[in-house]
Amino acid sequence: MKNQTTKDRPQRILDTALLLFYNSGYFNTSVHDIQHAADVSIGSIYHHFGNKQGIARALYHHLADQMTEAVFQIMAENAGLYRQGRAFLDYLFAMAETAPAAMHYILCARHQEFMPGEKSICSSKPFERIQQRIRQAMDQGEIRKLDPAIASAALFGGAIRLIHLRLDGVLDRPLSDCAAETWQCAWRCVALQ
């Protein structure tokens, strides 16, 4: 085993699992694959996570917590839904470019297949906070009144689809090249008329 502290092992296991899930898929990755690639004992994996589903759940919550933190920072640093939404879109696009495995796990993995009972990512804290902010913007007359789910899909559905296209290799240019136009189109869907 490489020289590592006990404190580092859980994160090392999560990081390794993320890459293996990204490259091979959840169902094609075994606990032994993770153990071997992370260079940890099988006992460490079972001690920290219980099993592969425990790793997947911990990874999901870890990434959702990071995204929640980013959303709250974006909300605090930007005034108005227009700027907040654009900053969130930029964050999503940057994450897809710099951490494609994490973005793929967040947006593309079919979590309910291997973590039954877990909320979908669109029902997780960061996306719930975005929907709350959208409702607030409607109440304050910042955007027109719509069903909040429709408004949320209008604002971020196109961006999420572009992320899928980028992760799948269909979109061959950086997402940042598409950000301004994507946000302009999205904002027109909810803007006061």
Image: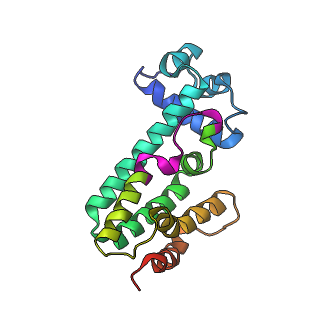
Vertical position of residue 167 compared to residue 4: above or below: below
User: From this viewpoint, which residue is outermost toward the top?
Assistant: 43
Tell me residue 167's x, y (percent).
64, 57
Q: How is the image coloured?
A: rainbow
Of residue 138 and residue 171, the one placed in the foreground of this image is: 138
Numbered marks: total = 0
> Does residue 35 show up?
yes
Q: In the rendered view of the protein, which quadrant contains the N terminus?
A: top right
Q: In which quarter of the view is residue 177 placed?
A: bottom right
> Does residue 1 show up?
no
- Residue 119 belongs to the span the image colors magenta: yes
- Residue 71 belongs to the span the image colors magenta: no
Vertical position of residue 99 compared to residue 29: above or below: below
Vertical position of residue 182 compared to residue 23: above or below: below
Tell me residue 80's x, y (percent).
30, 70
User: From this viewpoint, which residue is outermost toward the bottom?
Assistant: 193
Q: Is residue 68 left or right of residue 101?
A: left
Of residue 190 and residue 63, the one placed in the foreground of this image is: 190
The part of the chain drawn in magenta is 113-127
Which residue is at a point 52% across and 47% down the rendered structure image? 121
Q: In which quarter of the view is residue 82 placed?
A: bottom left
Of residue 108 and residue 152, the one placed in the foreground of this image is: 152
Tell me residue 123's x, y (percent).
48, 48
Q: Is residue 58 left or right of residue 125?
A: right
Which residue is at a point 36% across and 63% down the rendered structure image? 135
Q: In the rendered view of the protein, which quadrant contains the C terminus?
A: bottom left
Which residue is at a point 60% across and 40% down the rendered structure image? 111
Tell me residue 119's x, y (percent).
51, 41
